Amino acid sequence: RRGLATSLLGKDYPRDDWTNVTPAITSKLPLRLHTLPDHPLSTLRSLIEQHFADFSHLSSVSPLVTPATNFDELGFAPDHPGRAPTDSYYVNRGLMLRTHTSAHEVEVFRAGHDRWLLTADVYRRDEIDGSHYPVFHQVEGARVWDAGLNGMREVAEDNEARRAALAAENIIIEDVPHVAPTNPAQSTHDPAHAALVAENLKLSLNGMILKLFGHAAGATKAEPLRVRWIEAYFPFTSPSFEVEVFFRGKWLEILGSGVVQQLTLDNAGVPHKIGWAFGLGLERIAMILFSIPDIRLFWSQDPRFLRQFAQGQLTSFQPYSRYPACTKDVSFWVPQGASLHDNDFCDVVRDVAGDMVEDVKKTGRTSLCFRVNYRSMDRCIIVKRGGLVLHSQVVSRLKEQFAVEIR
Ligand code: PHE
C-alpha cells in the first residue's frame, strides 16, 4: 500500500514507510462527536464552556498536524516515546493525527486569543479495553496576561474574587505549593508572578470541577466534593499539576495543567505574555457523569443510545440488551528476526472488527511449544490413520501427568 495515497477529509496524502493510519481510524475524522447536538460529549463540552463563558470557544480545527506542531514546538525531547509510530498515528513522515489538543496552543495564541477553549478529537494508539479508544476528545483551555505589573495586578484581583466565591462552596481542596523546588517557576519568570498565575489556574479549575461534579456527587455539608492537586511534569508547562477528584470511592485523574512554557508563547509571537493552560479528556468524565460503562458507546449510532440524551442534560445512561461475549484465542509464530507490537495486533483487530470487539488481552497463561523429531536408527516409525502413535502417547501422558490443556 506504500506509495498510494490516503484520502483524509477530502484530500489525498502520499504514504511512506511511516504510514500507519488504518481505514478504521481515518473513518473517524469526519464524525466530530463533540459537535453533535444532544451527544453527551457535546453536553459536557457546553458545561465547560459555560464555566468559561468569557473565553473564545473553538471546536473545528483539523486533526492533521506536523510532528513539529504536535511535539517540537512544545518542547518534547527528540527521543520522547510518544513520537514512536507504535504510539501515534502517522499519515506519513511529515504529517500525523494530533495526540493532544496542546498541539494547537501556538497557533491559537498566535491568532491573538488571550483566553480560550479548544475542543477536538485526538488520536493515540493503544490497547483495546472498555476505557481506551484510539480516538477520544480533549478540551484545552488557556488564559494569558501581560507579564508586566498591570497584568499581575489583574491576576491578583481575579484570584481574590474567585477565592471568595469558592469559600462559600462545599469543596475540600488538597493543594500543593504553587511553586516548589520540585516544581519550579521558569527561569524567565519572577517566582511570585508564576505563583499568582498558578493560583489563578487552580481557582479557575476548582470552580469548573465543582460545576461538573458538585451536582453529580450530591456534595452536601456532610459530604463535600474532594479535589486534590498533585505536582506533575509536562514539557510545555512549569510548574505543572494534575488534578484528581474523589468520586464514588475512588480518586479519578481528570486533567493536566500548568504555567505555559515561555517557548510556546515565544513561538506564538507573544513573548511578553504569561499564563496557564490545561487539557482534559472528555470521555472519562462523561463516562462518570452519564454512567456510561463502555467507551465504545460514544460512537454508537443506535437510537437506543442516542435518544437517551438531550443537549445540556446530565441524564444517567440506562443499559439496553447485551449480547453474550464470544472470545477467540490466536497464537502464531512471528517471522524470524521480526517483532510485533501489541498495538500492531490491536489495529489489525480494530480494522477488521471495529466496535464489535470489547477488549483484547494477553491470556496471561504460559504456552509452550516443543518440536519432537521422531527418527529411529534402524526401523521405520508407524503412522496410523494420519497420526503418529508415539506422539499421541506422549500427548496423553502430558495431559495425565501435568493436567495441561492441548491447544
Ligand atoms: N496535553 C496534555 C495531555 O494530553 C495535558 C496538558 C494540557 C497539560 C495543557 C498541561 C497543559 O496529557
Image (spheres, rainbow, N blue to C red):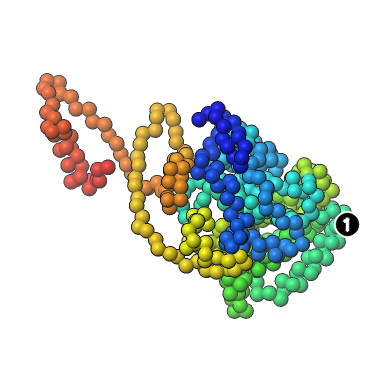
Image coordinates of residue 122 in percent, x first then y, are 60, 48
Q: Nearer the viewer, residue 231 or 324?
A: 324
Image coordinates of residue 358 in percent, x first then y, are 43, 52
Q: Is residue 108 visible?
A: yes
Q: Is residue 252 visible?
A: no
Residue neighbourhood size for the residue with mark 1, other residues' Cα within 10 Å, grouped as few (<14), some (14–19), many (≥20): few
Q: Residue furthest top?
A: 378
Image coordinates of residue 172 in percent, x first then y, are 64, 70
Q: Residue at x 58, y 68 (%)?
A: 314
Image coordinates of residue 368 in percent, x first then y, are 30, 39
Q: Residue at x 81, y 61 (%)?
A: 155
Q: Is residue 7 above or below residue 197?
A: above
Q: Is residue 65 above or below residue 237?
A: above
Q: Is residue 303 above or below residue 105?
A: below
Which amino acid does the dot numbered 1 rest on? Leu
Q: Residue at x 78, y 65 (%)?
A: 159
